[in-house]
Image (cartoon, grey):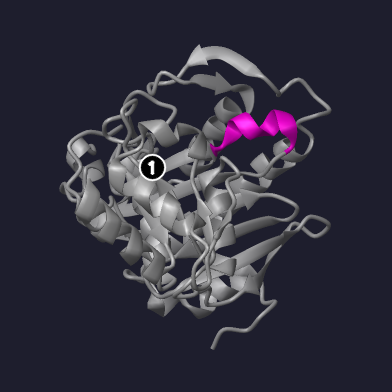
Amino acid sequence: MVKKNQTLGEFIIENQEAFPYSSGELSRLIRSLRLAAKVVNHEVNKAGLVDILGLHGDTNIQGEDQQKLDVYANETFIQTLINREIVCGIASEENDDFITISGKNNDNKNKYVVLMDPLDGSSNIDVNVSVGTIFSVYRRVTPIGTPVTSEDFLQPGNKQVAAGYIIYGTSTMLVYTTGCGVNGFTLNPALGSWYLSHPDMKFPENGRIYSMNEGNYVHFPEGVKKYIKYCQEEKDDRPYTSRYIGSMVSDIHRNMIKGGIFIYPKSSKANNGKLRLLYECNPMAFIVEQAGGKATDGFNRIMDIQPKELHERAPFFCGSKNMVDKAEEFMQKYS
């Protein structure tokens, strides 16, 4: 029985049997992510006071300039997971390749791999707009006792055992799923505890918000252009409201609560879209589906795509089911 205002620790213990594997390791993994999130939250909240704003001077594997907080968040999550002896491998959007973790006894006994975007929307930090962390958890597929390989990371999203995000906004929230619905926890900064504030989160079937970067309109596929015009048409319950923050975590979080669709399509500038399948699309798709929404690439279910490389990109349509269905109609008809 879900009790509002219970702590994340209490919730994990009470729902241990609902996890795909009940050895306790997945619970420890969630607790580790919870700890790292508190550390990163502390740094995000004082970003304007100390020298962690602005560019770090390096470029990540995606060719994007790394913000200082990107680097800090990446190191914090990686070190926390390594120190807790829970995972056998980590892949991050900020790193060229995956990290193998053999354990202190070099026995490669751990069963889980984590993929993450340590700070989504970090270019918003300078202007004090919400940012987030996204994580995805899989059970390894290679034999226990051997080092992880790319095969452990290149799994379709339907093999995820957990996924979640942390949103660093007006309040800090951790939202996650282990395949049994979606629950949101809000951090009480005075006590350092996470409390269940949003139990059993659900997307409304219909929404009135569409979220995309309309500045790239001329580069979008014809199906997306037609859908935008549909959203703007003065008919029935339309026009819809356009809301775009530029942080996927924040946009999807709002749409889950209020009802809406988030679209980051392919374009003439980015033929496969810009979002990363493994670090962004798959974990958010798992959450969206568990909350009763829908997530596709405009034609096919995101979580059924077989990844071919760590930093693979994909177009992304997700949100309220009926809105995504309608967007897919336009894609199939015009694109």
On the image, the x and y values in percent for residue 60 come to: 44, 20
On the image, the x and y values in percent for residue 229 come to: 43, 51
Q: Residue at x 28, y 52 (%)?
A: 298
Give the answer, above or below, for where 116 lies relative to 240: above
Give the answer, above or below, for where 301 lies relative to 155: below
Q: Is residue 191 left or right of residue 19?
A: right
Q: Nearer the viewer, residue 307 or 322?
A: 322
Asked if residue 138 is among those painted magenta in the image, a careful observer would answer no
Give the answer, above or below, for where 3 lies relative to 75: below
Residues in magenta, as a range: 120-128
Q: Which residue is mark 1?
A: 279
Q: Residue at x 74, y 37 (%)?
A: 128
Q: Main secondary structure of the magenta part?
A: helix
Residue 286 visible in image: yes
Asked if residue 125 is among those painted magenta in the image, a careful observer would answer yes
Q: Secondary structure at mark 1?
A: helix
On the image, the x and y values in percent for residue 14 come to: 52, 80
